[in-house]
Image (cartoon, grey):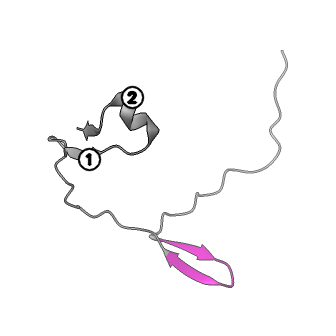
Amino acid sequence: MSSVKIMGGPIKEPPKPTKYADIEGQGRIPYATLKDEKTPNIAKAKITKGKRRGMGAALRGAEFTNA
């Protein structure tokens, strides 16, 4: 039977988490924090009306509506 030889020592401890990015020789940059923000209600669409212009307006009608 064969055996596997592992070169090296035991694993190192991983770095501990921080709330900033530390750039060597340049300083620290804080990470963004979570904030609750109010979002608009988009359940009901805004209706836009207007008049078409140009040659195509004569073919397709003079007004449009976007919902």
Q: Is residue 29 left or right of residue 65?
A: right
Q: Which picture quadrant has residue 58?
A: top left
Q: Quadrant of the C terminus?
A: top left
> Whole-percent x and y of residue 55?
45, 38
Above or below: residue 63 compared with residue 33: above
Q: Residues within 10 Å of mark 1 (few under 14, many from 20)?
A: few
> Helix or strand or loop: what does disc 1 sit on?
strand
> Whole-percent x and y of residue 14?
58, 57
Q: Which residue carries the number 2 mark?
A: 59
Q: Name which residue lies at 55% across and 80% down.
A: 28
Q: Name which residue lies at 43% across and 43% down.
A: 54
> Considering only order in the chain, which callout, 2 or 1, is on the residue closer to the N terminus?
1
> Helix or strand or loop: what does disc 2 sit on?
helix
Q: Nearer the viewer, residue 57 or 43?
A: 57
Q: Which picture quadrant has residue 25?
A: bottom right
Which amino acid, by three-letter code, is at mark 1?
A: Gly
> What's the magenta region?
20-29
Which is in the foreground here, disc 1 or disc 2? 2
Q: Name which residue lies at 65% across and 56% down.
A: 12
Mark 1 to mark 2 CA distance (whole Å): 16 Å
Q: Is residue 66 left or right of residue 30?
A: left
> Whole-percent x and y of residue 33?
35, 67
Q: Which residue carries the number 1 mark?
A: 50
